[in-house]
Image: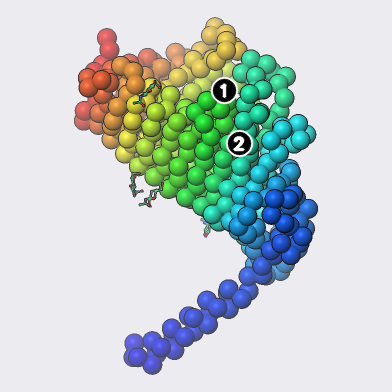
């Protein structure tokens, strides 16, 4: 290319960039009456309505400052791609009763090309809710709101946002296709009940990348119908680790298919990577294509675990084995320290043994000594180094 052509091309490029920028219409909540330290539910709802109706790409802005927000349900379909930029701190009501038993505090749903981003924090102020949470034992306990519900989103991105002290799960993903979480910060104390980081169900192509998640429950969990899920460069801890399941409790569950967990660190978690299914399952189902690779464990109680007899609080009988079949699973290059002598436990179902399980280069120690490995109803392929087999 000659210089003139390069300059012309470059000018055209700059023009295009400014054109695209100019095309994005801003909808600042301050213009809709939002004020710091006050409730912005109405302002945000109205800004969203106008932005969503825009025929050119739009952006709703919540600037720096602290705001209060009641339950909000922002829905599409929108007429063009839509972004929400949050740089402020948004506080949920402290008292769970002020959320009137809704399942999720901040909901986004039925949108194509949605982006939520910014330096902002969504603070669920969950302390009061955790103190009253008895949902482990009491089936009729009060419903506590999760910080976020993302439902039926396509081609969407959640970026840089922090989620803090949710009353329940931090993020619930349902019915989404091609949704990426990147650079997220999710935090709640180790002692907070049920504050799972990101739970995914009935969704395809969900990615969680470059994120930090420390809570009182699972870091990331996959429910039924999760497909093609990627977890990359995520640090978990404290909490219960990365979990597939629990599965097999309900009769209408869909298979879980395709999970890659790569380059992750788990610190001081109860579990590292695990797959858990209930015994006495009402249905035959499948968990397939699960790959865990390049993972560092730091003081993790059960670093590698398949538990097909998962039955907390004796909510089931173990009369019949699980009918959830686990197939095509690999654990590769997993190293670090365990908080117990057991490094690997693969406890598979006697009716449908795990198949095509591979262990490759697992180097886990407990107090400086090599950990153990225990296999029930499975015969994994072993490559490289692995913990000491138990008889
Ligand atoms: C998302 O994709 C699904 C499957 O292609 C489609 O049925 C649905 O209408 C899409 N939703 C939106 C809001 O575009
Ligand atoms: C997934 O969504 C992102 C963000 O909108 C988009 O850039 C990308 O092209 C989508 N990927 C596919 C395979 O549709
Ligand atoms: C991995 O994630 C951390 C944030 O947790 C980030 O600082 C780092 O740049 C990421 N690494 C890569 C290669 O993206
Ligand atoms: C892998 O994880 C380490 C430790 O968190 C991080 O520094 C590095 O950037 C990650 N690499 C990639 C490719 O994500
Ligand atoms: C290691 O984990 C155990 C059990 O979770 C915990 O009691 C202990 O404090 C942890 N040690 C360190 C050094 O964090």
Residue 165 is situated, as x and y percent measured from the top left of the image, at 58, 36
Local SS, label 2: loop
Report the front residue among 66 and 133. 66
Q: Is residue 82 above or below residue 72?
A: below
Local SS, label 1: loop
In the displayed structure image, the side of residue 136 where residue 310 appears, left or right: left
Residue 245 is situated, as x and y percent measured from the top left of the image, at 52, 28
In the displayed structure image, the side of residue 381 where residue 279 appears, left or right: right
Residue 168 is situated, as x and y percent measured from the top left of the image, at 62, 32
The disc at residue 200 is none
Residue 172 is situated, as x and y percent measured from the top left of the image, at 60, 39
Question: Where, by quadrant of the figure, is residue 224 drawn?
Answer: top right
Q: Farthest residue toward the front?
A: 37
Q: Identify the residue at horizontal 63%, vertical 74% (top origin).
A: 23
Report the front residue among 350 and 128. 128
Q: Identify the residue at horizontal 37%, vertical 14% (top origin).
A: 376
Question: Where, by quadrant of the figure, is residue 211 drawn?
Answer: top left
In this rendering, does residue 288 appear at all? Answer: no
Q: Identify the residue at horizontal 48%, vertical 50% (top origin).
A: 182
Quarter of the image with the C terminus in it: top left
Does the residue tagged 2 have its C-beta within 8 Å of any atom of ligand 3? no
* Alpha carbons under labels 2 and 1: distance apart: 27 Å
Identify the residue position indicated by label 2 in the image: 166
């Amino acid at each position: 290319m000659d210089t003139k052509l390069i300059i012309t091309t470059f000018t055209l490029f700059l023009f295009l960039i400014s054109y695209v920028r100019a095309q994005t219409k801003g909808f600042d909540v301050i213009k809709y009456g939002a004020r710091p330290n006050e409730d912005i539910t109405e302002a945000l709802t109205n800004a969203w309505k106008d932005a969503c109706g825009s025929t050119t790409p739009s952006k709703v802005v919540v600037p720096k400052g602290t705001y209060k927000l009641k339950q909000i349900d922002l829905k599409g379909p929108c007429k063009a791609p839509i972004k929400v930029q949050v740089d402020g701190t948004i506080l949920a009501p402290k008292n769970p009763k002020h959320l009137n038993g809704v399942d999720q505090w901040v909901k986004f749903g039925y949108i194509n090309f949605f982006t939520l981003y910014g330096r902002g924090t969504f603070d669920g102020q969950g302390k009061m809710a955790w103190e009253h949470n008895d949902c482990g034992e009491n089936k009729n306990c009060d419903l506590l709101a999760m910080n976020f519900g993302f439902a039926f989103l396509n081609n969407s991105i959640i970026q840089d946002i922090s989620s803090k002290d949710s009353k329940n799960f931090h993020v619930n993903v349902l019915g989404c296709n091609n949704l990426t979480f990147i650079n997220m910060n999710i935090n709640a104390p180790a002692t907070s009940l049920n504050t799972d980081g990101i739970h995914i169900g009935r969704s395809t192509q969900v990615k969680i990348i470059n994120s930090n998640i420390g809570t009182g429950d699972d870091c990331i969990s996959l429910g039924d119908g999760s497909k093609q899920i990627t977890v990359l460069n995520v640090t978990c801890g404290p909490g219960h680790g990365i979990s597939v399941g629990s599965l097999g409790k309900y009769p209408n569950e869909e298979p879980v298919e395709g999970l890659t967990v790569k380059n992750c660190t788990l610190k001081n978690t109860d579990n590292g990577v695990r797959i858990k299914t209930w015994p006495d399952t009402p249905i035959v189902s499948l968990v397939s294509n699960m790959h865990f690779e390049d993972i560092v464990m730091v003081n993790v109680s059960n670093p590698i675990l398949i538990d097909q007899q998962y039955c907390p609080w004796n909510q089931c009988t173990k009369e019949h084995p699980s009918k959830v079949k686990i197939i095509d699973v690999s654990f590769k290059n997993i190293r670090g320290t365990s908080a117990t002598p057991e490094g690997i436990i693969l406890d598979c179902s006697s009716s449908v043994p795990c198949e095509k399980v591979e262990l490759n280069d697992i180097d886990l120690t407990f107090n400086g000594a090599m950990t153990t490995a225990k296999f029930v109803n499975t015969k994994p392929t072993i490559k490289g180094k692995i913990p000491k087999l138990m008889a």
